[in-house]
Image: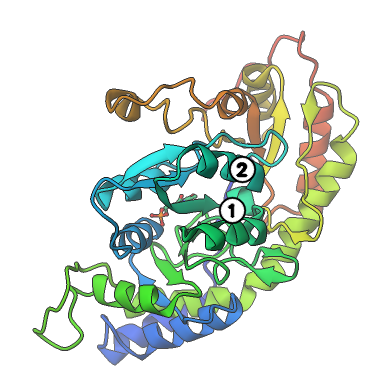
Amino acid sequence: MIPIAKPYIGPEEQAAVADVLASGILALGPRVREFEQAFAAYVQSAAGGVACSSGTSGLCAAASVLDLPPGSKILTTPFSFIATANSIRYAGYTPVFADIDADTFMVSAETIREALDRDPAIRAIILVHLYGQPCEVHEIMELARARGVIVIEDCAQAHGAEEFGVPVGGIGDLGIFSFYPTKNMMTGEGGMITGSNRTLLDRCRLYIDHGAPARYQHTTEGYNYRMTSIHAAIGLCQLDRLPGWNDARRRNAHALSSALRDVPGLTTPYERPQCTHVYHQYVLKVQHRDALVAHLTAAGVGTAVHYPRTIPDQPFYRDQGYIGSACPIACRMADEVLSLPVHPAVSPADVQTIIDAVRSFTPTATPVAVGVG
Ligand SMILES: Cc1ncc(COP(=O)(O)O)c(C=O)c1O
């Protein structure tokens, strides 16, 4: 089976972890600071970097330091992993959803402008660079700055992605990254907070360490969301390889798109001009999704659906009074999207297997039985 994700753990990672264990400095240590500096430099984050325990804890810290009145409205996308919206609730604010664009699967500057015009009470925005593609972040920043609205970039899926040659994560007031094992680079579990707003990033540094600028001096609210030296050591190895891995993802994606573009019943991913899409996921829009998944599984091709339900349509959000059908384009995309393997371990032969498997699908054919064991 060609898996949908395959984290790389090489001898360098193993040696780096062994070194940390031998040093005895497992929690905050030189490796964490080194990783923060190297990652912040890579994404050109003017305010620096704050390593944390996950993308989720980074998002929760970022939302929590905004210092807005309780219940303030924060605009975000309905089509993302649940952590994006949950972090708004975690910080005591109210998520508001703008519908997405059917080509990019993301909120656009236009949908953001409409939402801000409709509801001037919106105080902040959490954007998501979904599947590795930057959203219209520069244009959205202009809109937001003009209205005094804060912007957090959720870059959990977009390490190294660029709009107009500028990496995501340093454009908004704050940015967050995830280093979960399936991401473009990983640390096991882990995250990084970046951004252009030094005041907010300094608050995040306190927030992820019990609000303590010095030992047992707690000046603000905070928790233990720190990254360990073990995770940072893995991150430093992976960061070195990230540009090469992103190139491999892009090569695989372009090979898939040029071979699948003419296949009826599916749409290959749209790449925004003047952007570097780093293909965290390679996502088709398809008809007959269930039958295609069964066909691909039988052919040894792993697939996944990111995401089968919009956030407002999740039972928990419906219980809070959100209307499942409120973002109709996002709902339609939840029925159509299908991710194919695109990660760096997908070889040219694997790409051909995937192409042959997709091209041999006919919606009327009876799916081949999936072997077990
Ligand atoms: C868009 C998005 N935001 C946030 C997260 C949360 O990151 P983590 O799993 O590191 O907590 C993820 C992870 O899947 C994600 O894809």
Observer able to see residue 29: yes
Q: x, y (%) of residue 46?
A: 53, 82
Tag on residue 25? none
Which residue appears at 52% of the width and 37% of the height? 98
Which residue appears at 37% of the width and 41% of the height? 95
Q: Does label 2 or label 1 sit earlier along the sequence? A: 2
The residue wearing badge 1 is: 129
Please tell me which residue lies in front, 146 or 52: 146
Check if mark 2's residue and mark 1's residue have beta carbons within 8 Å: yes
Tell me if the residue at label 1 has its CB under 8 Å from ligand 1.
no
Q: Residues within 10 Å of mark 1 (few under 14, many from 20)?
A: many
Please tell me which residue lies in front, 269 or 29: 269
Q: Name above or below for residue 142 compared with residue 46.
A: above
The residue wearing badge 2 is: 106
Which residue appears at 53% of the width and 66% of the height? 172
356 to the left or right of 49: right
Report how far apart the C-alphas of labels 2 and 1 lie in the structure: 7 Å
Q: x, y (%) of residue 16?
A: 44, 83
